[in-house]
Amino acid sequence: MNSQLIVKNIKNLVKIMSYRKIQLYDQELVLVVKSQLLYDILLFFKYHVSYQFNILTCITGVDYPNNKYRFKLVYDLLSIRYNIRLRIKTFTHELIGVDSCDQLYFTAGWYECEIWDMYGVFFKNHSNLKRILTDYGFEGHPLRKDFPLSGFVEMKYNETEKRVINESIELCQEYRTFKFLSPW
């Protein structure tokens, strides 16, 4: 089953499921959906006989701070039976939670924890949503575009106290601007 046939089948299913847009880019099928319907659409594509997207290969987050829905979540699905990939995109912001699909796809648990940790997108009904890539007590979400480049605190091992300590960031060297043209 090729991607053109799947696009044709999906367009016929518009009465059953609601979606915003279908894109076909370089033989890759992309479906843009509302965040409220994401779980139902993932459930449909996993268990429907004509599709059987049984493997979730990745969930990716992207931050667009100037948009109304600043976070884009991209779900990459793979159908082994038909040897085709499907990309499902949805948009949200930090006040709207997205339904978790960790009960549907076992790999989703790690990806959703990573997106929660890095971007602050909350996943409803997640079995164990926690920070996995930042330290305990870390404030903020480092992959957001509005996160400060130097961070807030610095963690380092103090040899005299024989423990890890937290200190506020201090930039020792002042920022300098050079008002001459470089010959190089």
Image: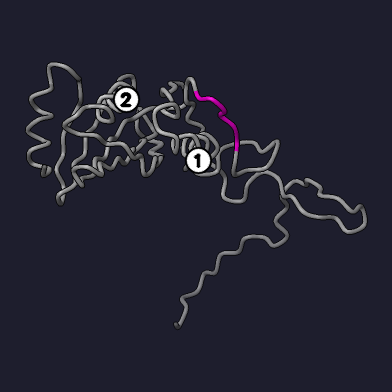
Question: Magenta segment, which residues?
Answer: 126-131
In terms of image quadrants, where is residue 130?
Answer: top right
Q: Which residue is mark 1?
A: 146
Number of residues whose C-alpha sits closer than 10 Å to that of mark 1, classed few (under 14), some (14–19) or many (20 or more): few
Prevailing SS of the magenta stretch: loop
In the image, taking residue 146 as reference, residue 73 lies left or right, namely left
Q: Is residue 129 magenta?
A: yes
Above-or-below relation of 157 to 139: below
Residue 62 x/y as whole percent: 39, 41
Whether residue 10 is visible here, answered yes or no, is yes
Whether residue 62 is visible here, answered yes or no, is no
Residue at x 20%, y 26% (from the top left corner)? 20
Q: Which residue is mark 2?
A: 38
Check the picture and name the quadrant holding the C terminus: bottom left
Q: Nearer the viewer, residue 50 or 140?
A: 50
For marks 1 and 2, the one nearer the N-term is 2
Element on which disc 1 rests: loop
Badge number at residue 108: none
Q: Is residue 66 magenta?
A: no
Given the image, on which type of amino acid does mark 1 rest? Asp
